[in-house]
């Protein structure tokens, strides 16, 4: 794999909340008391087993603590390492796992304020996604309004598996607020674990959970299109993060076939799903599920019928490739440049305003 050009925009890195204690200064008195008195435990995202190789590369893994928790290492390994101009921090801390809406709201606010003080204020190359509590879309919309005043927040972050498919009307206040603030919705791999992560029931192993994520992204894209999210919010962009991308053309062929036969159900889906996806969907490239032969990847990319959909990501500190060689073999130099600069700037208006 080749490495990205100097000054690329990395659309998915993961600073880690070291532990619950680190968030205490960012919770208000009531919630700080609650956390201490109730003995609330760590809210780590459970999709990434702590000590598994996929979670952190050996050279990015600290002796103590979590990979991605140390600013100095992240600067050296992710920002200097890839020589990126900007990198978008997507903090995965399990806020979405909580069953109480009020506590989820408190933790989302704490994570966002922690992100400002501990990361954004300390390196001007960093940008971030707003963590929201999807458990209560009104709270989520309020948090989008609050954090969007800081223009270093360039996106809203959700997990691909929540209580129901993300196209449902329940979530529309989130999309309305995001569109109003000019923010794309970043949908990251991961689950609130309200349902099995496969469509046929609970699996046994982490590998099954990881492989099932692309099914969830397929279903989510279908839901967003068929429920009419992009008809209701014509300026909204959705970015799939850690989704893989090789599945997209075949899924859209299948969806397109059934849309043709059943389109009387959904008159607002007024174009082939591929055309809607080309306008509204973007996908990050790591972890890559590209075929190993470059000539096969070139053919696959042709089926996208667009050179605007893929965005560069390192997915630091997760382990998917060696060194800084994060660009899959078989992607042309012209497309690499689009993925690394032009496409992120078009997707994230707040990055564009920062470079002009
Ligand atoms: Zn990621």
Image (cartoon, helix red, strand yellow):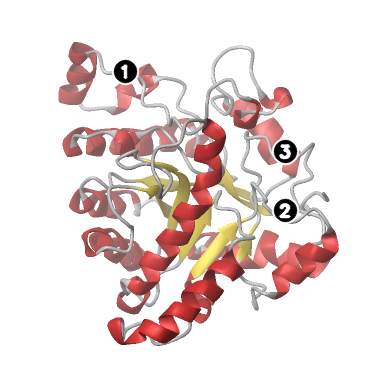
Please tell me whether residue 126 is drawn above or below residue 329 in the rendered image: above
- Report crowding for label 1: few under 14, some 14 to 19, many 20 or more residues within 10 A (C-alpha): few
| One can see residue 151 in this view | no
> Where does residue 55 sit, x and y in percent of width and height?
59, 30
Taking depth in this image into account, of 257 and 133 the one nearest to the observer is: 257
For discs 1 and 2, the disc positioned in front in the rendered view: 1
Local secondary structure at mark 1: loop
Determine contact: label 1, label 2, CB under 8 Å: no
Looking at marks 3 and 1 on the same chain, the residue that comes earlier in the sequence is marked by 1
* Ligand 1 position by quadrant: top right
Looking at marks 1 and 2 on the same chain, the residue that comes earlier in the sequence is marked by 2
Q: Which residue is mark 1?
A: 41
Q: CA distance from mark 1 to mark 2?
A: 39 Å
Q: CA distance from mark 3 to mark 1?
A: 34 Å
Local secondary structure at mark 3: helix
> Where does residue 101 sit, x and y in percent of width and height?
19, 39
Please tell me whether residue 266 is drawn above or below residue 349 in the rendered image: below
83 relative position to 93: left or right = right
Residue at point 79%, 37% (across, down): 323
Q: Which residue is mark 3?
A: 80
Looking at marks 3 and 2 on the same chain, the residue that comes earlier in the sequence is marked by 2
Local secondary structure at mark 2: loop
| One can see residue 58 in this view | yes
Q: CA distance from mark 3 to mark 2?
A: 10 Å
Taking depth in this image into account, of 230 and 36 the one nearest to the observer is: 230
Q: Which residue is mark 2?
A: 7
> Where does residue 157 sit, x and y in percent of width and height?
41, 49
């Amino acid at each position: 794999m080749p490495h990205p050009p100097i000054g690329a925009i990395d659309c998915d890195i993961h600073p880690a909340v070291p532990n619950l204690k680190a968030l205490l200064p960012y919770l208000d008195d009531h919630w700080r008391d609650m956390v201490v008195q109730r003995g609330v435990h760590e809210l780590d995202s459970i999709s990434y087993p702590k000590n598994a190789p996929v979670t952190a590369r050996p050279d990015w893994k600290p002796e103590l603590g979590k990979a991605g928790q140390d600013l100095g290492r992240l600067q050296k390994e992710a920002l200097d390492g890839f020589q990126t101009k900007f990198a978008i921090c997507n903090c995965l801390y399990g806020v979405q796992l909580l069953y109480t809406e009020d506590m989820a709201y408190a933790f989302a606010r704490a994570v966002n304020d922690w992100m400002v003080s501990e990361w954004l204020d300390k390196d001007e190359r960093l940008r971030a996604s707003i963590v929201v509590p999807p458990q209560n879309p009104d709270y989520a919309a309020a948090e989008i309004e609050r954090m969007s005043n800081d223009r270093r927040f360039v996106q809203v972050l959700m997990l691909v598996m929540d209580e129901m498919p993300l196209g449902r009307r329940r979530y529309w206040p989130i999309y309305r607020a995001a569109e109003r603030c000019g923010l794309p919705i970043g949908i990251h791999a991961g689950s609130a674990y309200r349902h099995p992560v496969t469509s046929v029931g609970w699996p046994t192993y982490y590998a099954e959970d990881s492989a099932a994520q692309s099914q969830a992204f397929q279903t989510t894209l279908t839901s967003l299109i068929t429920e009419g999210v992009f008809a209701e919010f014509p300026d909204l962009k959705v970015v799939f993060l850690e989704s893989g991308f090789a599945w997209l053309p075949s899924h859209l062929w299948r969806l397109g076939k059934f849309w043709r036969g059943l389109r009387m159900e959904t008159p607002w889906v007024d174009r082939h799903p591929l055309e809607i996806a080309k306008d509204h969907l973007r996908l990050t490239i790591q972890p890559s599920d590209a075929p190993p032969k470059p000539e096969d990847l070139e053919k696959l990319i042709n089926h996208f019928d667009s050179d605007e959909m893929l965005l560069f990501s390192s997915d630091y500190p997760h382990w998917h490739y060696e060194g800084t060689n994060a660009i899959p073999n078989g992607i042309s130099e012209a497309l690499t440049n689009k993925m690394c600069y032009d496409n992120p700037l078009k997707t994230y208006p707040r990055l564009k305003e920062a470079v002009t």
